[in-house]
Amino acid sequence: MCIFRTAVLSIVLLSGFCAACDGNDKSDSRDRRAAVLANGNTKTQVIDFVDPTYRGRIRQVYNPNGDEHNLYHYRTPFNSDNSSLLGIETPHGTKQYQVTLYDGDGRFLKKLFTVPEYDWRVVWDRKDPHIFYTWRKTALYRYDVQWNKAELLRSFEPLSLKPAGPSFNQIGDRILVVTADNVVHTFRLPDMDDERLCHIDMPEGYYAGWDKLRLIGYRDYFAVTFFERGPFPQGGKPKPPFTRIYDAATGKVFHTLEGISIGHGDFSPDGKLAYVKLNPRQGRAGRRRPRPGVQARVVNIDGRDDHAVYELSGDALRYVRNYHITWPDNVNDWFAMSFFPQTGHLPAEYKPPLDELMQIRTDGTVKILGRTGTTCAKNFWAQPQQSPSVDGSRILFHTNGTCQVGKLGYESSGTIDLCILYLK
């Protein structure tokens, strides 16, 4: 049930991508890296190279002093005009997330704050390149990166906010948060008025994926996936998940997507969802059945036109552990998809799919943009988790440089580094 009420209530721009990465440079990329590293490993450096296999232009933000990651794959780390990006640093020997500001080409600008002062799950303003929105326990804040200043927008005390963090509608005039009582709140900005509340009715025997509930970037719709609650009998499996699409403007369920989870998928600005579906295992009884294949599929959020745009067999996926899909906020006709392998489980020779970052168009055209060079063991953030800019001109991802099969351009820092792949 949904209830509506009216609530009472200096970025330094540095140089861009180096000329050596225009795709025409013939010099040894390792010579360039050696020159950069000779300056010392005590500060963040940038290393530019061209992917040896797929010719993608890549900038590695080299930092041996700790791990870096983005805001999770569907949260855009770049601001509205690509002049800045946000990364999360975790220095060696600590578990502290430091929210850090870089220019749009990955050059370090300044540390902003350390969690738990404010939370790292933030969202950039869709119009003002100097503003993002963050939260802490029971409160929502507007943060100005020019002045390193947080402004309290709304306290929900005594209720805490759920870990989904804030998200925006398509035109950027409404913001969403979820409180601990399972209520979705949306407000009109900048005055935080016209509050609308939606209580999520929980289906019996199910729980909600609260951490990934978000406005999907199409009109005023938000989405949440429901999973069957265990325990299950020995040999039993949960029923397939389902995703409800809600219209935050009307408070009604718009549509239910059966058998689909939004966790590793993403939405387009014209109302489509890109997701992965496993093909059924095949094989005769009594024999070892092959791995399931996968299909990357696109479906309208009203359930129409559900079709495959990319497909791989189970045999081809032998060394692939998992995937992520992301869709640029202002791009309708393509999304990015990445694969990554398990640390220590690599082929003797390079052959895709393994660690590629791909551009998949809605007409089924597929282009491999480059290799991420990463493998994942226990550290979740070693996954590439690519996240494009709003206009799709660049993609931020992670690497630990450990996928040492075939030719790579990365210099391993011994940690997880941020990288930018340029499409324009």
Image (cartoon, rainbow, N blue to C red):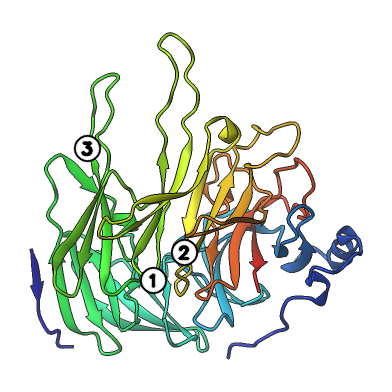
Residue contact at pointers 2 and 1, CB within 8 angstroms = yes
Question: Of label 2 and label 1, which has the lower sequence position?
Answer: 1
Spatial CA distance of label 2 from label 3 is: 30 Å
Q: Residue 319 location, x and y as percent?
A: 61, 34
The answer to which quarter of the image holds residue 366 is: bottom right
Q: Residue at x 76, y 52 (%)?
A: 53
Left or right: residue 314 versus residue 357 is: left
Location of residue 162 with respect to 227 vertically, above or below = below
Estimate the x, y position of residue 268 in percent, counting from the top left. 40, 66
Q: Position of residue 420 (x, y in %)?
A: 65, 66
Residue contact between numbered discs 2 and 3, judged by CB atoms under 8 Å: no
Q: Which residue is at a point 58% across and 53% down the rendered structure image?
A: 384
The earlier-in-sequence mark between 1 and 3 is: 3
| Res 388 label | none
Disc 3 marks which amino acid?
Arg
Decide: marks 1, 3 in contact (CB < 8 A)?
A: no
Residue type marked 2? Trp
Could you say which is closer to the camera, residue 65 or residue 395?
395
Q: Which residue is mark 3?
A: 229
